[in-house]
Every structure is written in structure tokens, then in C-alpha cells.
Image (tube, grey):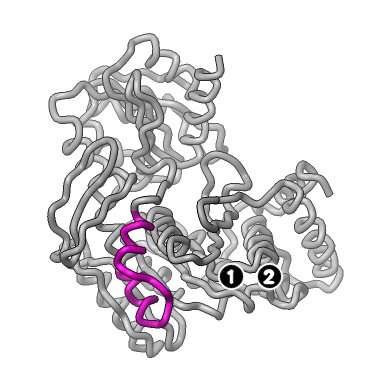
Amino acid sequence: MDFLDAMKFVESRNPGGMVLGLDAVTKLLERFDNPQNQLKFIHIAGTNGKGSVGAYIANILVAAGYKVGRYVSPTILEYCERIQVMEGDTCAYITKEAVGEKIERIQTAVQAMEEAGEPLPTAFEIETAMAFLEFKDQKCDYVVLEVGLGGIEDATNVIETVELSVLTSISMDHMHILGDTIEEITEKKAGIIKQGVEVVCYDYRDYENGERIQNVIDRVCQEQGARCYRTDFTKLTEQSFTLEKTCFSYDGVAYETKLLGENQPKNATLAIEVAKVLRDKGVRITDEVMQSGLKRTEWKGRFSVVNQQPLVIVDGAHNEDAAKSLAKTLKMYFVGKKVTFVVGIFADKEYEKILRITCPYAEKVYCIETENPRALPSEKLAEVARRYVDDVVDAKSVEQALDLVYARRDEVVICFGSLSFLGEVYRYLKYKICK
């Protein structure tokens, strides 16, 4: 099967709505003798920071000499980005040929499932199975696995061979699926906690709803007999931020990373605590390995500088908590600067809250509509933005918005919102450079 035919099959398995549960993915993986059972996982759930924390953990393990698989979603640049294998100085995406070969096998299995009257897997469940097959074929030492949505009923939670469960920041998002209270949402995400498997979690003490979040995590850990290690942000000192790097000390050790934004020292310290627990379990990780791993980490679309003249930064702030972090970051980097926004957000997100939090830092806002069917119409987004900013343009598309930005040579341009729209920004800039 070639790559295009594979993509057609995967897309044909996209349901009309979100389908959670483990029955179908369990049946599918059984037909391949459960490749996931031959892998060792670091499983990550949370509302924000999963990608950054996962990138840090993976790079620390690579710096320690291990071969590491990463499964991420959503992707920004290309489809194959979701399945990565890292070793030494290389990070290779799954090849289109490997996608075609594995999806052909999966399609045959799905047809057999249909004939047997079994529940059929969704696109995400098929992609999860493909990832496990690839990581097994590549003989990965560890797999850093991000939850797709929630935790307890997410397809990734089919795994049993978990080394550590990791919980990043937790806040209100996907309420129509995960629940209307922070306790319900935390319960879903804490569903990745396995019997007797250690847990490393974010420091929620100074966090909105932090005590309520921690209480749920502590209860689930107690029920599962799982020891919980908490990151301690009081040990985080000497923070400095530039547009080139972020520096900080944690527990008396100095670190630096290329990842930018006020939240990155916190994400990095969570990864450091994960590395320390792994070290206690016998994994070959020293302080120097942790320093090297953080320093080498790159992760596109998270307050990433993508152009210098004009200065263009992309960020995946697409919920209330991420918007608050973006606002803090803008205040930290761009005091006294004229900042222009290019914004595209899904209709099922709390776009009014996101704009209310971020727009006080903008002089001008361009509203766009992404190519995704979930996108909020740009005219609706512009209507809301005008409540907070006088100069708002309904630019319709990324291309039209960035054409206007380049014509004006704005001082600082922040493109943010739903992650799928950031890929359109990268493609525009690549075309602009080639042209």
C-alpha cells in the first residue's frame, strides 16, 4: 500500500464524534500479538505541557545513550511527525513506506474484525497501533507516550508495561468530553496511573484549583498502590529568559534549554524529577546527562521564534490556562513593544476567555480561520476580539494575515491558537523563504 492509500484508509476511520474506550484498540492489538507488551513506556497525561515535558524526557534518555520512541499528537509540520525514533544525534520520523506497510497490515486486521462483528478502531487507535508496531520494529529501549485525550479511556492507556506515569499541568479543557469540574477532568487524566507503578506529577501548590487536583491524584495513587513523587517549584531559582534560551537552577544544579516561555523551567523540572526516579530504578542518568538532554531539546510550536524580520513567534495557546501562560510570557519578553496577533482557534475552545486574557497585550489582531473543520469562523473570532482591541482585521486565512504582516513590517508578531493552524504558518514562511 502506498502512503496516499494509507492516508485514505486512516481518514475513513475518523468517526463523526470522539470515541473513547479501549475495546477496539485492545482487539486490534491482539491480532498483532500485542507489540506494546514488548516495550517500556513513560506515559504522560495532562492539559498543557505534555509535548514539552515529553521532549525533555526523551532527550535526557537519548543523552544517556538509549534509543527512544516518541508518540505525539497533534502534529504541526507533517503526518509522519507523530511517530519519532531518537538515537544519538538523530530524530527520524516514521517513513511513508513504513506507514504504507503497517497500515496495509492494519487494514487487513480491521476487515477481519468487521467480519467477526467486533468493535472497529478509530483513526487515532489505528495510528496508536501503528506506533507500537514501529517502535517494536525499531527495537526502542523506551517509548515516551503522550495521551491523545484525557487518559483513562484514551487508546494509549491500553499499555501495561509502564515504567512511570507522568502528570503535567491540569486545567479546564475538553469539558464536553472530560467533565465540567476540575475533579472530573483530573480523575480522567489520573486514569493512566497503574497498579504499583510510580507517578511523577507537577507542583500544583500555587496553581489554580491546585489542592483539588492534588487531592484527586493522591486518592487515585492510594487506590492503585502507586507512590507519587511531586515536583517542587520552590527549588527553582536563578531563572533568566531571552529569545535565544532559558536558564534556571533546580535543586542547586544549573540548566539551560532552547525552549522559551515562562512555563518552560517548570516543565523542565518535571522532566528532571522523572529522570531522577528513573535513575533510582537503575537507568543510567547523571546530572550531566540531564543538563545535556535539556540543552539539546527542541520542540516546535511552543513559543518558537520562526522568523527574525519581522520577529514572528508561534505558540499553541488554545485553552484558558495556556492563554494565561502566554500573557505572562508576553509581559516578560515584550514590555514597551508593539505586538501584533495572528489568531486561529477551534470553535469548541473557550475562545472568548482566551482573547480576554491575551488581547490586552496586542496593538493589532488579525483573525483567521484554519483549514480544520473544527475551526471557528474568522468573522466570529474578530467580533469577539473587538471587545478588547480597537484594531482588529478579519483576515480570513493565514496567507492573507501574514501577507499583511509582512507589508507592515510589524515589530513583533505572535501567531497562536489551535496547533493545526501553526503548521499553516510554518508552510507560509517556508514558501516565503523559497520564493
- Contact, CB < 8 Å: mark 2 with mark 1? yes
Rendered residue at 62%/62% (across/down): 128
In the rendering, at what x and y percent does residue 31 appear?
A: 77, 74
Q: Amino acid at mark 1?
A: Gly
Q: Is 248 left, or right, of 182 in this rendering? A: left
Q: Which residue is mark 2?
A: 24
Q: Is residue 277 magenta?
A: yes
Q: Splitting the image into 4 quarters, where does residue 310 fall?
A: top left
Q: Splitting the image into 4 quarters, where does residue 347 fall?
A: top left
Q: Which residue is mark 1?
A: 21
Q: CA distance from mark 2 to mark 1?
A: 8 Å
In the rendering, at what x and y percent does residue 408 appear?
A: 33, 10
Question: For the residue labelled by badge 2, is the local secondary structure a helix, a strand or a loop?
Answer: helix
Question: What are the residue bounds of the magenta stretch?
Answer: 273-294
* For residue 111, above or below residue 23: above
In the rendering, at what x and y percent does residue 225 appear?
A: 38, 90
Rendered residue at 72%/46% (across/down): 96
Q: Quadrant of the C terminus?
A: top right
Rendered residue at 30%/43% (across/down): 260
Q: Amino acid at mark 2?
A: Ala
Given residues 432 and 248, the one toward you in this image is: 248
